[in-house]
Amino acid sequence: MARIFCIANQKGGVGKTTTTVNLAAGLARVGQRVLVVDLDPQGNATMGSGIDKRALQLSIYDVLLESASIVEARQRNAKVGYDVLGANRELAGAEVELVSLDRRDKRLKQALAAVESEYDFVLIDCPPSLSLLTLNGLCSAHGVIVPMQCEYFALEGLSDLVNTIKQVHANLNADLQIIGLLRVMFDPRVTLQQQVSDQLKTHFGDKVFASVIPRNVRLAEAPSYGLPGVVFDPASKGAQAFIEFATEMVARVQTLKPAHAEPTF
């Protein structure tokens, strides 16, 4: 049975999509069966996985409106090694259309139930806002992976996200828990980043992943080639860090306990 994780942070520009596609590629590289669900109308995870969002015949939009199944809508790029349920601008319209529909926050969960047995991991790339799309992701997931930069504004955004997760856990999805914080775009030469990293470890303990993703030019270049950095340049420091993170995720999943009464940090 697949483990379903949202990659979420209400702050924009923190590397959610980069984390999603590179973790997916890293997991595929260590032998896991992976599905990436792109829940962002910008479609960056789709394009970053080598799939042209403009040419999609069926997308997550069709799945949420129940006019197609995931089996019909998913695509695979052999180069990256995982399946993708793609998104494009059509998805922005789903926000409005879902409001008046039944089970509007559980539609992705129901669709995923039909393919759960085919995957080890399902990774959901969420938009940087608390919308019906993000809510569908959180209602489907077993846990949330939070990519964050080691900056003080990022700490403020984290408290908002934790409150959101607690509310979803209490009202909509009792299985939801916080899996961990992933430090991304990290530059050890910057004293402030070291200080914030130390604060994170002090406050959140083993909820902070041991893996750290460095600021890396090759990771930044990879999307322009329609590939995750792990595939584009496997020898780069960024790619190696994501492969290490994928290995850590596989180990952490095996030790996950059922969700507590309330997600805690």
Image (tube, grey):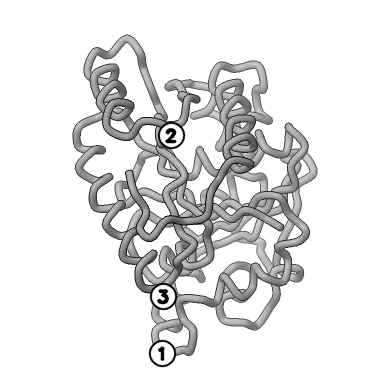
Where, by quadrant of the figure, is residue 61 drawn? Answer: bottom right
Closer to the N terminus: mark 2 or mark 1? 1
The residue under label 3 is 95
x and y percent of residue 248 in the render?
59, 31
Comes first in the chain, label 3 or label 2:
3
Q: Mark 3 is on which residue type?
A: Glu
Residue of label 1: 100
Asked if the residues shown at circle 2 and circle 1 are in contact, with their CB atoms under 8 angstroms apart, the answer is no
Q: Secondary structure at mark 2?
A: strand
List x then y, in percent, for residue 48: 59, 43
Distance between the alpha carbons at the discs numbered 2 and 1: 36 Å
Mark 1 and mark 3: Cα distance apart in space: 10 Å
Above or below, 121 relative to 222 = below
Q: Of callouts 1 and 3, which one flags the residue occurring earlier in the amino acid sequence?
A: 3
- Element at label 3: helix
For badge 1, the amino acid type reads Ser
Q: Residue 71, percent across and down?
A: 75, 68
Secondary structure beneath label 1: loop
